[in-house]
Image: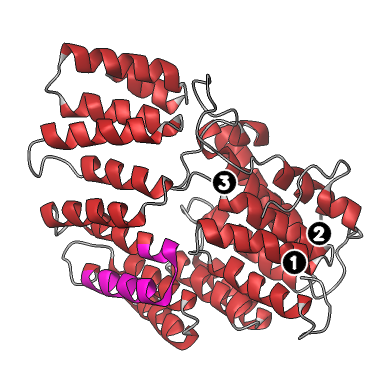
Amino acid sequence: MERGQLFIESCEWQKAEADFEKAAQLEPENAYAYYNWGCSCKYSGRYEEALRLFEKAVSLRTEKESIVFFRGLGDCYERLRRFDKAAEAYEKNKSEFPENASVRWDLAELYCKIGTEPMLDRAILETEEILELKKIRKSYYLVKLADIYQLKEDYAKAIELCEKALKEEPGYSRAYMRLADIYLNGMKNSRKALKTMKTAFVSLRETDALYEDCLRVMTEILGTRGSFKAARSYGDKAIGVWEKEYGSLQAYLDMKKYRNARLYLLGKVYYFSGRMKEAADSFHAMTPCLKEAEAGQEQPANGMCRHCSSRECWEYYAGQGLLAQAAGDFAAACGYYRRALDIDSSDSSTRLRFRECMETAEGKKQRTGFFRKKTIDSITTAQAYGKEEKHDNRN
């Protein structure tokens, strides 16, 4: 079992599966052996087999033994986009662990992913119930609730919740970042967004857990305002944090289980600091589809990312949308953003960019690029899409 866990961490799914299968043979009543076996199958894209193993683990578990069993089952159903079954699994987990905030958040997060108004309302109710629990970090879930109101475009309520979080926990960086995003992307007030993040940096230390996140937010704000020299300074500091923690930027990117998500973050740093060639290189290095294994294959050709509960990468399409938008190809950008939102509707910035491009493509707004000014590197269609133009609109 222990060796199998190490193989899971190194993304060696076949070796992990072999160890967990052997563990299940040796201890056929061990629920964790089947759970871990199911995880290895899930990460290699064999979802139906993973479901069978998760169900077996659930049947063997002791009631209220651990939150992992129904969570694993729900996560697998999410990847299959069987959201009703995912919600059912998370509800069962909630009934066994009603005081566990993270278990309840699994449900709220699923509703946000679906993203319809009724589902967002259910997410709000679920999060409000979380806030009634004892021994939680209240400021964290107040910001989570603000996220949902931002998705509903109720910015006044979202701002109110962020301010409440700051009263609960003065200097809380996550609340400042959410406020800045509301001002920048929701209310199109980059000046107020910049002022908010400057306030955050007054008490922020380089050792803080959210320091790198704050650097990236500042990069986006300054880039949107056209202050690319300052944006590059903050972006380079964010890259420096990754290099310091992992030894090099390449080592940071080489962690297979988070590679797509990290390439997306890096691409956005380059994008908002005006380095379009580097941004395009990062976005194009992502894999668009993390599908099930083809016939005769042990695992998907592109490998499997463990960053989220989707079988395709919404960040890939969001990245392509940014490039198309910068190149002035708003119709293509709409296609990419729509695909990203079909996979996961919970990113408010992508939702707003999609609408912006729709309005521009339909001629309702003046035809302008994403930035207020031209980027440092001249943006052209060839630069945005890359020299070989491999990545077409996949709708």
Mark 1 Cα shell of 10 Å, populated few (<14), some (14-19), many (≥20): many
| Magenta-highlighted residues | 111-129
Report helix, strand or loop for mark 2.
loop
Q: Which mark, by number, is residue 274?
A: 2
- Looking at the image, which residue sits at the far front? 295
Residue in the picture at 69% in, 58% down: 234
Q: Is residue 338 left or right of residue 232?
A: left
- The amino acid marked with disc number 1 is Gly
Residue contact at pointers 1 and 2, CB within 8 angstroms = yes
* Residue ID for mark 3: 261
In this rendering, would 18 be left or right of 180? left
Report the amino acid beneath label 3: Ala
Query: Marks 3/2: CA distance?
Result: 20 Å
Q: Position of residue 35 (x, y in %)?
A: 25, 31
Q: Are marks 3 and 2 in contact (CB under 8 Å)?
A: no
Q: Which residue is mark 1?
A: 223
Whole-number angstrom distance, CA of label 1 to CA of label 3: 21 Å
* Quadrant in the rendering for residue 301: top right
Sequence-wise, which precedes: disc 1 or disc 2? 1
Name the residue nearer the viewer: 60 or 104. Answer: 60
What secondary structure do most residues of the magenta stretch adopt? helix
Quadrant (top left/top right/bottom left/bottom right) for the C terminus: bottom right
Q: Is residue 123 magenta?
A: yes
Q: Using the image, determine if residue 295 lies above or below residue 239.
A: above
Task: Name the image quarter holding residue 300.
Answer: top right
Q: Dot 3: what SS?
A: helix
* Quadrant showing the N terminus: top left
Indicate whether 269 appears above or below 152.
above
Question: Dot 3: few (<14), some (14–19), or many (≥20) neighbours within 10 Å?
Answer: many
